[in-house]
Amino acid sequence: MIEETVEAQRRVLRRLIESLVYEGALRPEAEPGRGVPGEARLAGRDSESGRGSRDRVRLVGRDGDGDPVVYSWAARRRHSFDRVRLGPGTVRRAPLGQPPAEALSPRLFLDEIATLLAASPERRNAFAAELERTVANDAQARRHWRAAGRRASGSTFDDLEALVVDGHPYHPSYKSRLGFDDGDNAAFGPEFGRPIRPMWVGVRRDQVEWAAVSGLRPDVVDDRVVLPVHPWQWRRHGTTTWAEMEASGALVAFGTGEDDYRAQQSIRSLANISRPEEATLKLALSIVNTSTARTLAPHAVANAPLITAWLQGIAARDPYLGRHLRPVLLGERLGVAHSPDLAAIWRESLHSYLAPGEEAAPFTALTHVDATGEPFVAGWVKEQGVEAWTRRLLTVTVAPVLHFLVAHGIALEAHAQNLLLIHAGGRPRRLALRDFHDGVRFCATGLAEPAARPALHPTPPEQLRVNRNSYLEAESDEEVRDFVHDCLFFVNLGELAMFLEDRFELAEERFWALARRMVEDHRRRFPDLAGRAARFDVLAPEVAVEQLTTRRLLPDTEVRLHRVRNPLAGVDAN
């Protein structure tokens, strides 16, 4: 028990420090006698000298008595977007007059460097609570993972959704799940793989909104629209929030069905394991995870089938997408919503799209390491060679997302949790994408087919006030381009680039050279799109990425971004 807790504390504290330094919220100084100032290397972006070199740096905070306390660590810049990575060794904490010891508490760290952060005590404390719950939930999941002795290698797609326990690779509160206690985490956390049966309810027709792709309608019983409710959500709201609706007959509980479901990585998405080709259910869940409420906004539920029809229509009309790349766009075919707490989306199952001989793995599995220390992709890389495998992976990954951007002006939220690799025995074949209801971005003037754009429901002003990042329509082409960079290249492929260098000795620079080749190949293939490729220039020297951690410490009244070096810009694709 202690071992997993300490591991989780180290992981959370490391990600917290890495992200705060990377986003410029903290600016450590070099330890005395270490030569080049650490601030110039780790906080500054004007000098190339900091890339790849390890520095010992420190921050001086204040303990509860107001005395100095020094935090120190080793860190270096990586080639991938100049990311900051700590190590080797641990974070050390040295109170005044005492020898340094390992620092483990994220809350204590935030408290003691509080004067260095532009954050109110209320926001800092709320964020610390998320970090502490992340430690507890991650430790619990990893204890189960190790005790079960399960290995990811050779596992099916559905099993991998439970076996990959790492969570968001950048966000420090990657497993906060505020609202769950330990029992809830074990019952409903994807890592535990336990069967879940939703509660099915009927809500009077005049109290819900629904939308569907052509030819599909929700089930209706006695003038009530039927929708599923997560069992935790029913326990929380059934006898309180919805009590008046039940008393009036506006809501009727029909009970659980016969099918078993299992939580996918996003927690609120449940895959049907009794009938795998049936729809996956995305359900409103009143918890906070990775600092975001996991309810379902009614306008987004209503948009889901509209966006599905739009994207799938584009893919069907575009020969490069429809016949050559053949990406799978897992459609959100039906959505029903009464309120953010009572809503559901039916999403297509991947199983119905797989051809004979094809298998699938979530992209998060590509950087996963078993409890034995073996990477999930080790066998594939050994058999095919790391560069050959990486080239195939980038071919099937970059091309469809890039083509949607350049040819059509649509950015897809292609982070690792939303991408699925379809492969044959580990050889990448094509890409599957999911989660579109609030996972696209476009600028009206940049669309190639503006007349095909559906009439989407706008984000309500009250939601934008509490979550400025919740929107679909951008104000500029650069903003659309940066959305692709942030999701696909920064969080997703950036993690893979660092992983392949650390584990398989494929230099990050070589990874990005291969990725750049995919971009240049697309430009050679479509010379008629040269103007649009320049308009959505993914090879620009700098791009903007979201400040995911800083955002938690400041009011959520604006989109918080910082400009970073683009690793695609400074490499030779030959």
Image: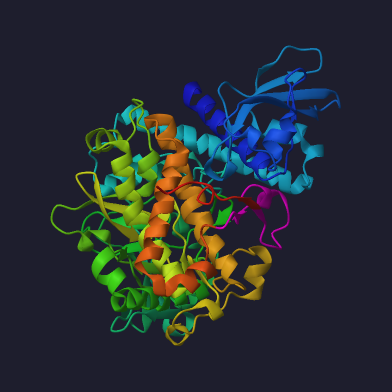
Of all residues, the one furthest to the bottom in this rendering is 451
Of all residues, the one furthest to the left in this rendering is 356
Q: How many marks?
A: 0
Front one among 537 and 56: 537
Q: Is residue 218 above or below residue 122?
A: below
Which percent across, then down, holds residue 187? Answer: 39, 45
Q: Is residue 63 above or below residue 122?
A: above
Colour convention of the picture? rainbow
Q: Residue at x 66, y 72 (%)?
A: 462
Front one among 212 and 536: 536
Front one among 378 and 155: 378
Q: Tell me if I can see residue 439 in this picture.
A: yes
Q: Residue at x 47, y 40 (%)?
A: 509
Q: Is residue 541 above or below residue 131?
A: below
Which percent across, then down, holds residue 293? Answer: 56, 57
Asked if the magenta segment contains residue 263, the reply would be no
Asked if the magenta segment contains residue 548, the reply would be yes
Q: Tell me if I can see residue 435 in this picture.
A: no
Which percent across, then down, holds residue 37? Answer: 75, 28
- 549 with respect to 409 (left or right): right
Of all residues, the one furthest to the right in this rendering is 66
Q: Residue at x 42, y 84 (%)?
A: 452
- 449 with respect to 391 (left or right): right
Q: Residue at x 50, y 66 (%)?
A: 296
Which percent across, then down, holds residue 153? Answer: 26, 36
Q: Which residues are magenta?
A: 540-562
